[in-house]
Each structure stands twice: as structure tokens, then as C-alpha cells.
Image: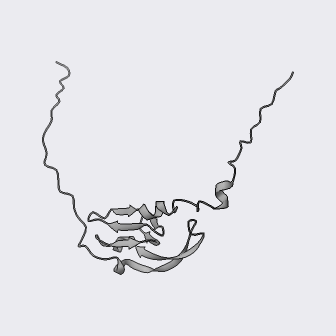
Amino acid sequence: MVTFRAVGTVGLERPPLETAGVEGQGESSRLGSRPAYFASVGDFVAADVHAGDRVMPGASFHGPVIIQRMGDTVVIPPGAEARMDRRRNLIIEWRDAIEGGLDGPPRDSPQDSVAPAKPALERRRITP
């Protein structure tokens, strides 16, 4: 015999997922505020800025809020809400934001009436 192959399965106990810290509010994570532009408002709005590594599980935010984390920055627009769950996932709900048109420029903005760009290529017949 040159080759011998076996396939088997073993049942393993799944390790429990860790939860992060105790639940609290987001005030201890607040760094300050700064103006942020939102197309839905059409102007700069004062947005609270929070340090993402100091946001505790259970903290909730009402937009506009900016959460600065090590690998990304999360912007919560006006009308949206966010909360940090026990595993440090940021859950964002846009119900009011979508109904209010905050998913892009205002519905009656001039940007809605701009014609889409036409391709720069033209068809030309080449004659010998």
C-alpha cells in the first residue's frame, strides 16, 4: 500500500463569545464637536465627536455624531440613531433618516435634475 487516506468528523464544543465591559452611556467617550457637512441639510451642522475605543456597550447616539475608531470613522447623519451592543457592534437605524430623505441630496435639489453624463465615445465610419 502506497497511500492511505481517512476522513472523519469530531464534535467540538463552541467557545463562548466574549462580551465587552459593562454597559454605560457614551458621555465618557465624547471628545468634543465639530462642523460636518450633510447634503440632506444643505449646510454644516455641529456633530458630536466620540472616541470609538471608549464607547461602552449599551451607549446610544442620536445623529449627527462622528465616531472615530482605529480602523474607520462612522458618521451618523441627522435623524439616524446608533447604539453599541454588548459585543461592540455599532447598530445604526436609519428609519427617520430614510423617510426624511437623508440618504442623499434633498429630493428637490438641483442635483436631481442634472442629466447623466454621456459617453465620450462616438461611432465613426472609417472609409478606405
Location of residue 35 in the rendering, given as x and y in whole percent from the top left corner? 55, 76
Taking the image as drawn, is residue 94 in sight? no
Q: Is residue 111 above or below residue 76?
A: above
Location of residue 24 in the rendering, given as x and y in whole percent from the top left corner? 27, 76
Instruction: Residue at 82% x, 27% y: name it.
Output: 125
Instruction: Residue at 34% x, 72% y: name it.
Output: 60
Quadrant containing the C terminus in the rendered view: top right
Location of residue 120 in the rendering, given as x and y in whole percent from the top left corner? 74, 42
Q: Foreground residue, 71 or 121?
A: 121
Most distant residue in the top direction: 1
Instruction: Residue at 15% x, 32% y: name it.
Output: 8
Instruction: Residue at 31% x, 65% y: name it.
Output: 88
Is residue 76 found left or right of 27 in the rendered image? right
Q: Is residue 36 above or below residue 17?
A: below
Q: Foreground residue, 11 or 40?
A: 40
- Label count reads 0
Q: Foreground residue, 5 or 57?
A: 57
Is residue 73 found left or right of 11 in the rendered image? right
Occupied quadrant, residue 85:
bottom left
Is residue 105 found left or right of 100 in the rendered image? right
Taking the image as drawn, is residue 86 in sight? yes
